[in-house]
Image (tube, rainbow, N blue to C red):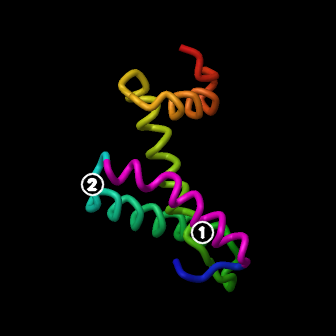
Amino acid sequence: MLLHRTFSHILSNMLLFLLLSYQLEVKYGVVRMVVLWLVAVMGGALFSASFEAPCVAVVGASGGVFGLIGLFLADLLLNFETIKRYYVCGVGGGVVGGGGLR
């Protein structure tokens, strides 16, 4: 989790983690977020390693970031009408295809 190939790799992981984790942590709690992060990191590493050549090192924690993205999108789709921050609805609506129009 602490090894990354390039500086841009670790920077993009850190930025996405910071953008997504705070709001999700407030909503779901620290314990659930830690469990999700660890399961996503380990699952991503195992999935990646299963398709790589046998002697290739798997580095980075991108699986954890993709786990957070998955939780964010699932939460957005399931609870779209209850989100009180309209800028989040607009961003999520653009991603999902609604364009944020209400």
Q: Which mark is residue 29?
A: 2
Q: Is residue 25 magenta?
A: yes
Residue drawn at the location 45% of the way across and 37% of the way down = 74
Percent x, y of residue 68: 48, 53
Q: Is residue 89 above or below residue 44?
A: above
Q: Which mark is residue 50?
A: 1
Badge 2 density bin: few <14, some 14–19, many ≥20, Cα 10 Å: few
Which secondary structure lies at badge 1?
A: helix
Given residues 80 and 26, the one toward you in this image is 26
Q: Which residues are magenta?
A: 6-26
Given residues 42 and 35, the one toward you in this image is 35
Q: Is residue 70 above or below residue 6?
A: above
Residue drawn at the location 51% of the way across and 60% of the way down = 18
Percent x, y of residue 64: 50, 62
Residue drawn at the location 54% of the way across and 81% of the way down = 2
Q: Is residue 17 magenta?
A: yes
Given residues 59 and 79, the one toward you in this image is 79
Residue drawn at the location 60% of the way across and 72% of the way down = 49
In 3D space, how far apart are the residues under numbered discs 1 and 2 (Cα atoms)? 32 Å
Percent x, y of residue 101: 59, 16
Q: Is residue 78 above or below residue 74?
A: above
The first of marks 1 and 2 along the sequence is: 2
